[in-house]
Image (spheres, grey):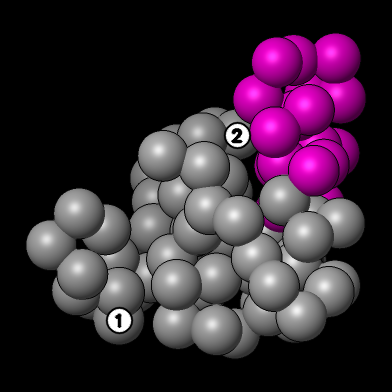
Amino acid sequence: LSRKKYDRAIKELEWTAKEKCPIQEARYLLGRAYAQKRSMDQARVQFENCVKMNPKSCLSRVCERLSRDATGTKVQIAK
């Protein structure tokens, strides 16, 4: 993501999230990558999946906020 190669990041994160290691952080990063590409519906889905994986984690709070932001017109990406 830091190199702004969002399509490549999405491809690798999709594989990680589904096949290799379904961890919450992969969904968070995938949501960020989609948000950077302005694919807000896909970003929201990934942030919601992040929350579902472990609703009580600190990362879930971040994902929940980003999910709400993804439904609006302006998105704030946490760095």
Q: Residue at x 30, y 74 (%)?
A: 6
43 sits left or right of 6 in the view? right
Which of the 4 quarters of the picture holds residue 52?
Answer: top right
Question: Does 49 sit left or right of 76 as displayed?
Answer: right
Badge 2 amino acid: Gln
Q: Residue at x 80, y 43 (%)?
A: 65
User: Residue flagged by tag 1: what amino acid is it?
Assistant: Asp
Q: Magenta span covers which residues?
A: 47-65
Which residue carries the number 2 mark? Answer: 24
In-front residue for pair 76/65: 76
For residue 14, what is the image quadrant? bottom left
N-term mark: 2 or 1: 1
**Where does residue 78 sit, x and y in percent of width and height?**
52, 42
Q: What is the magenta segment's predominant secondary structure? A: helix
Residue carrying label 1: 7
In screen coordinates, is 39 left or right of 21?
right
Vertically, is 25 above or below 14? Answer: above
Q: CA distance from mark 2 to mark 1?
A: 20 Å
Q: Is residue 39 above or below residue 2?
A: below
Magenta highlight on residue 6? no
Q: Is residue 73 left or right of residue 10?
A: right
Quarter of the image with the N terminus is bottom left
- The x and y percentages for residue 71 are 85, 72
Q: Is residue 57 magenta?
A: yes
Which secondary structure, mark 1?
helix
Q: Position of residue 54 (x, y in %)?
A: 78, 24
Please give the name of the residue rendered at 65% of the width and 25% of the height, measured from the top-left corner: 59
Quadrant of the frame with the C terminus: top left
Whole-percent x, y for residue 67 in the image: 79, 56
* Numbered marks: total: 2
> Residue shown at 46%/49% (left/top)?
29
Q: Is residue 40 visible?
A: yes
